[in-house]
Image (cartoon, grey):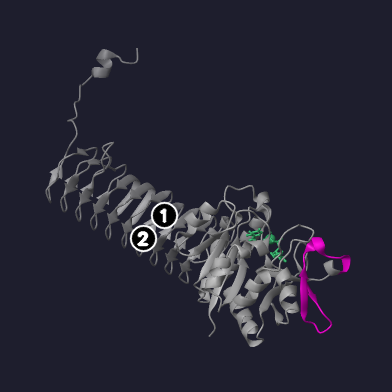
Amino acid sequence: MSKTCAIILAAGEGVRMKSNLPKALLQVLFKPMLTWVTDAVKKNSVSDICIVAGYKADKISEYIKDEWEIAIQNERLGTGHAVKCALDFLHRHKESQVLIVSGDVPFVDSDTINESLNTHLLQHNSVTVISAVLCDPLGYGRIIRDDNNCIEKIVEEKDATASEKEIQEINSGAYWFSAAALIDSLSKLTNDNAKGEYYLTDTIEIIKKAGKKVGVHVAKGEEIALGANTRIQLNKLNEIARKKELERQMLQGVDIPCTDGVIISANSKIGNDTTILPNTIIKDNVTIGQFCTIGPNTVLENCTIENGTSLSNTVVKDSHIGNNVSVGPFAHIRPDCDIRDNIKIGNFVEIKNSIVDDGSKLPHLIYVGDSDVGKKVNFGCGCVTVNYTGKYKYRTVVKDGAFIGCNTNLVAPVTVGEKAYIAAGSTITRDIPEYSLAIARSQQIVKENWVKEKDPYK
Ligand code: UD1
Ligand code: CA
């Protein structure tokens, strides 16, 4: 197999997006367009990637960390100039086939990348353009073919004649080049065109004139070419990706009776016979088991939910929730929670950085933070772990089978022993031994006939 590498063009600003981010970092289904592209490229085992960044290049380097090489294009002089900015990378990959793709055309898929590479190698082409046939080709470069149906050149919209504009086969902006032919043709580019830019597309004609083979791989469908110049178009890309992901999940056995407001990111795993209800947003890195009910009005991010669990009107982030757990309505599971099996978490409950072990119940109006809660613990309504002194945070430990009466404050650091029992309204500041009763509130005083004698309503 021949060696491969990729250059991703992402120096553009995307003026009409009116964003503080470079266009390639704007998101489709919670994932930057650039990552859609790198994911598809990586899937084909192309691991040497160079990203050409320019506008807000620092944001791109910050985002990709050191995963890939970055070449900087200081001024936007066109796609050909952008590739020239990666010459150093190209020289180091002289023997390779180079895939060139745009960082803002997110639906370039790994199958097309793979099939077009096969075409490229089989036909011994020096460049293979990935084209698509569009109902509305407006704005794209058109593929001009000669009498033998071979590609002759690509003409940009602005440079096209009226009859060329009729052509529906367009340049998707993705190509396979032999690196050597590309390097050679880049040195011959001029900016003699309507936009005054160095067009990468002109390399096709240059390579052909040099007597080398140029070819086209026609992609299936239109999606491969879709990009976005405005937020309205970005919304269209989101809608396409959203619908596709929902259909993929439904075909895998996930029940989505009404898709209104349901957004599922493309890398989520959901078990069959799980139901997703309206207004549920499943962001990055979520795994859900079988026979769960998720939603309505639920947001999940970076978490695992096991089987048979239901979450209603709930937000969960960076956490694990076990089997047969019932959460909500109106609960918030904040980062670093491990909620194990057969647990009830009811309305208006917030849990953060805590373990809650099997069979415990936290049914109403509770805050548990920085805590280790054992098995079969019962929290009464309105309990609070007092985890923060204003400067330091401490942990609360509640051992198995403890009963925390309503409206108890557990002032951390504190440990409630196994099967200990706390009277309602207590503020607990000292450890409670196992099997003990703790009452930490002032004694009730009753003054008989006080109302009649003092008459407080006078
Ligand atoms: C380009 C193609 C066109 C094709 C279309 C598909 C050229 C001359 N035209 O046109 O044939 O149909 O893509 O989407 O290549 N970029 C840089 N630096 C620059 C200019 C662009 O990095 O100086 C990047 C952009 O960020 C973008 C990509 O290159 O990711 C494509 O540039 P864009 O200006 O969108 O090209 P189009 O005019 O759409
Ligand atoms: Ca474009």
Picture residue at 21% right of the left edge, 50% below the top: 397
Picture residue at 54% right of the left edge, 68% below the top: 89
Q: Residues within 10 Å of mark 1 (few under 14, many from 20)?
A: many
Q: Is residue 59 magenta?
A: no
Helix, strand, or loop for circle 1?
Answer: strand
Q: Which residue has dot 2 on it? A: 321
Picture residue at 18% right of the left edge, 48% below the top: 416
Q: Which residue has dot 1 on it? A: 316
Q: Nearer the viewer, residue 129 or 362?
A: 129
Q: Nearer the viewer, residue 129 or 368?
A: 129
Residue 411 horizontal side relative to residue 200, left or right: left
The amino acid type found where label 1 is placed reads Val
Q: Residues within 10 Å of mark 2 (few under 14, many from 20)?
A: many
Residue 71 horizontal side relative to residue 134, left or right: left
Q: Is residue 160 magenta?
A: yes
Picture residue at 68% right of the left edge, 60% below the top: 78
Q: Are marks 1 and 2 in contact (CB under 8 Å)?
A: yes
- In the image, residue 232 sits, relative to residue 204, either above or below, namely above
Residue furthest bottom in the image: 122
From the top left corner, tell me how far across and down residue 191 is, in percent. 74, 61
From the top left corner, tell me how far across and down residue 410 is, in percent. 23, 42
Q: Quadrant of ligand 2?
A: bottom right
Q: Is residue 245 visible?
A: no
From the top left corner, tell me how far across and down residue 229 is, in percent. 68, 55
Q: Nearer the viewer, residue 243 or 128?
A: 128
The magenta segment is: 143-163
Q: Nearer the viewer, residue 1 or 169?
A: 1
